[in-house]
Amino acid sequence: MDNYNELMNDLNDQLRKGRIQKAYRYIFDVFSDVVNELKNYRSKVIGITSVYHGYLDMSYLPVTTESLKTNGLKIAVVFNYGSFQFELWLSAVNRKRRNEVLELLSQSKWEKYKTVQSDENTDAIIEIQIKGITDYNNKNRIVSLLSKETISFIDDIEEFIRSR
């Protein structure tokens, strides 16, 4: 059984150093810059709601378009603290819709992306790990990469929707 006094003392010790707070804020600075870049994207109307801060398991930025919304879908730009990386998830408005879309993807034999078939992530239909982020000092490159990958992922999902 966990000793919560020890856990809280450890947390307090780490927080007093101030580095965790700076790194945590940096993640949200990246999200904020991604929001600005996606809002300025001219070829597509993109809806963005507020960032979900999470419980240090994940933080995410929900992104949608009219087509995605009409189909009960959204994209999440995620920072996964467990794997310590940015990811993109295709998610549904609820579990019922998630299961319907998983079934549709399975029946279609669409192989552009691998679907999440385990119960480890019951929120995602598709989960993409963003590769190439090795230098956290280059925030502009991270923001550009996340924005580009998000747009590309949206385009692919919308193309799949149109083909059905």
Image (spheres, rainbow, N blue to C red):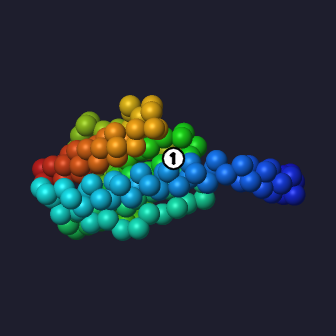
Question: In this orientation, which residue lies closer to the viewer: 144 or 92?
Answer: 144
How crowded pointer 1 is (Cα within 10 Å; few <14, some 14-19, many 20+) is rated as some
Left or right, 85 with reference to 55:
left
x, y (%) of residue 153? 26, 46
Tell me if residue 55 comes above or below residue 119 in the rendering. below
Residue 162 on image: x %, y %: 13, 54
Check disc 1 and give the amino acid type: Asn
* Near-viewer residue (98 or 159): 159
Q: Which element is circle 1 on?
A: strand
Q: Residue 124: x, y in percent?
A: 42, 52
Question: Residue at left 41%, top 68%?
Answer: 50
Please give left or right for residue 14 compared with residue 19 in the image.
right
**Is residue 146 visible to the viewer in this orientation of the structure?**
no
Residue shown at the point (63%, 49%) measured from the top left: 20
Residue drawn at 34 percent across, 39 percent down:
141
User: In which quarter of the view is residue 127 placed?
Assistant: top left
Q: Please say whether residue 132 is visible from this viewpoint.
A: yes
Q: Position of residue 89 (x, y in %)?
A: 38, 50
Residue at the (61%, 54%) spot, across then down? 21
Q: Is residue 136 above or below residue 33?
A: above
Q: Which residue is mark 1?
A: 80
